[in-house]
Image (cartoon, rainbow, N blue to C red):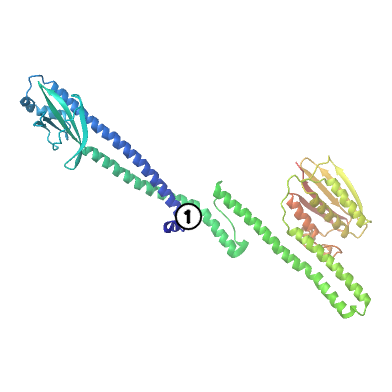
Amino acid sequence: MKLKTLIKNQSLKTKWMLTTGLTILISYAAICVIIFIALHTWLLAKEEENALRTVDDMTTFFSSQGVAVTIQDLQDQTGLMKAVLNQDQTVRLYQLDGTEILQINNTSPAAKLNMSFSSPDETLVHEATLDGAKAFVMHRIVQIGPRQYILQLVHPLLSFRSMMGYILTTMLIMGIGAVILAAAISYYASTVMIKPLRQLRNSMKAVKERGFESKVDFAYDSKDEIGDLLRLYKSMLHELEISFNRQQQFVSDASHELRTPVQSIEGHLSMMKRWGKEDPEVLEESLDTTLEEVARMKNIMEELLQLARKEAIAENISADTEEIVRQVANDLTFLYQSVQFDLHVIGQKRLAAISEEALSQIVRNLYENSIRYNENDPHIQTTIHYDDHNIFLEISDNGTGIPEEHLPYIFDRFYRVDHARVHVEGSTGLGLSITKSLLKKYGGEIEVHSKIGKGTVFLVRLDLKM
């Protein structure tokens, strides 16, 4: 449990290095064990094969000496027989009663004589430990002249043991080198891969401490999982910043714009308290003004909430531009009977890629702007132009016009053109700001052109529904 806790509390780089090192070490050890066992078996079989070949050569040599050969003759030929043996091998010749009569190349002590032959041609093979060293011991019955003898071959495994020790040492050295190399590569790779994660951590820490003022910039731009994570984080941070700014803007706008009607309501309530009980006209006037200011506050709050709200765009939305323009015009004609609306259509009807509610609000805001800022009987001309990729909506009026210096600011919140800040009845100063916000949400655009005394033209571009 302590080891598990210790590993758990290590850094990701350390865990990576330990995991990589242990994986390579275990894999290498398993491969080495398999190779070592295979080599051990193969080389041991080769040693046994060499020993049997020597026994065969000695048997052939004895058989070739003829029937008249004597032990003395064989002793005289020990030099020739040594040439048949390997340097470490020892051959002893025994009578059937176990008496040793000949020894060739005395490099190993004699082994216990094995007489358990099941047939005259059998070769008995076993491993024995002689003076602390492993060796193959082989026994075979050989025919020398008219008599039979027992041939004993002692084949030491010193070279085999030395070879296996060398192989094991080499594997250990290579294993240590492989682990060190793997650790170095793992350290470098983990450093490279952990770097963007550290940047992500530092960025989160900076945002926590300093807010959205801290700049988020990652040098890592690979198309892998870490790159996707960083891009997702930047996108989420951007969305959070927008939401935070909306919230801040909402609080600022609300406190800014609601201050005036609240003060007005407070003043009229004070007036009613002081004189309203005695003067019915003052009471009636104050109540009417208070109700107007409350209605204005309600409109301001609704429009502020609409600006602050961020809703996902639904799929498969579409709107019939002509139908919505006609519907909004009919609604406003009922409210403003002096207004004249004209509609011209160019091209074949196509649907716009925008919700009906959003398009209706856009058209209504532009129409109401043309009606409010007009000293004449309002005459509003609307032209809908369809092409292969867009729908253009042009709304022109015969109003007072907008001074050129105010044009860059008319889409700002609470900006009113009537000498920059004069209150227009029913206006909150948010209509055009909402219009631009809705168009931006659905990929549209809006432009404005105006001349004092001649009127204003709004040009709206909408995407086609594909």
Instruction: Name the spot of residue 230 as percent of width and height, x first.
Output: 57, 52
User: Looking at the image, is 49 positioned above or below residue 410?
Assistant: above
Q: Name the residue under label 1.
A: 12
Q: Can residue 221 be seen in this view?
A: no
| Observer-nearest of 152 and 24 | 152
Disc 1: CA contacts within 10 A as few (<14), some (14-19) or many (>=20): some
Q: Which amino acid does label 1 sit on?
A: Leu
Residue 77 occupies quadrant = top left
In the image, 366 versus 225, the foreground residue is: 225
Quadrant in the rendering for residue 455: bottom right
Residue appearing at x 32%, y 45% in the figure: 172
**Does residue 33 appear left or right of residue 237 in this picture?**
left
At a point 91% along the width and 54% down the height, the residue shown is 333
Q: If the image is split into quadrants, where does the C terminus sit?
A: top right
Q: Between 331 and 52, which is closer to the camera in this rendering?
A: 52
Circle 1: element type: helix
Residue 225, can we see it?
A: yes
Residue 406 location (% of width, % of height) = 79, 60
x and y, in percent, of residue 366 in the image: 83, 55
The N terminus, quarter of image: bottom left
